Amino acid sequence: MSFGLPSLKTKPSLPSEYGFKEGQFGVPEVMKTGLGSARGTVENVHPLAQSEKNYHQNMHKMNMQVLRNIQGIHAPLKITMELKSARKIGHLPIIKSSNIMLESLTGNDLEITPEDVFNTGEFLEVAGQPHAVLEKSLGIF
């Protein structure tokens, strides 16, 4: 008996070639390419890395599928509509939105993450003249 749930098994996706620029002796030329240049060419090293990167999205899909199987199509549609309308709520472009409605719908208001600690208003690097930012967002130059 299948409930139509998405698969939780990870599908390893390793690149066929890592793209290291090898030198004369078959090792990467660190002095020419640098130490940090390998990070951008290497895909997921561990098979669970991709699954963990998409954890919240996978859990949302799973919960919506279970909800659909239990209550019918109306419940996931209603939740999706509420999430979509919560994402559209905005302020003036110079004011950062707190997204409190979206966080309460997704349950993120119950968790303390590094973004909550290190993303405070006094440390924001976005600064500009309010009139110039508004004119740019409205297309008035």
Image (tube, rainbow, N blue to C red):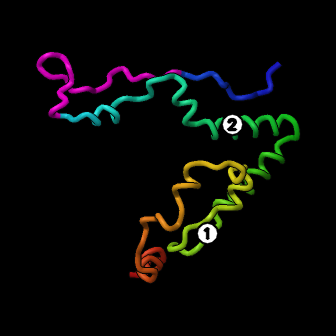
Query: What is the x, y in percent for residue 44?
Result: 45, 28
Image disc number at residue 29: none
Horizontally, residue 62 falls left or right of residue 57, namely: right
Circle 1 sits in a helix, a strand or a loop, which is it? loop
| Front residue (pair 105, 78) | 105
Please tell me in which quadrant of the rendered image residue 54 appears.
top right
Which residue is rendered at x = 44% and y = 76% of the image?
A: 133
Image disc number at residue 90: 1
Quadrant occupied by the C terminus? bottom left
Tell me: residue 123, above or below residue 106: below
Quadrant occupied by the N terminus? top right
Circle 2 sits in a helix, a strand or a loop, which is it? helix
Horizontally, residue 89 falls left or right of residue 132, namely: right
Query: What is the x, y in percent for residue 17?
Result: 32, 22
Q: Residues within 10 Å of mark 2 (few under 14, many from 20)?
A: few
Q: Residues within 10 Å of mark 1 (few under 14, many from 20)?
A: few
Please check the rendered image and state whether residue 21 is part of the magenta-colored stretch, yes or no. Answer: yes
- The total of numbered circles placed on residues is 2
Which residue is rendered at x = 86% and y = 41% of the image?
A: 72
Tell me: residue 10, above or below residue 39: above
Disc with the residue nearer the chain's start (2 vs 1): 2
Magenta segment: 12-32
Amino acid type assigned to the residue bearing label 1 in the image: Gly
Q: Residue furthest top?
A: 25
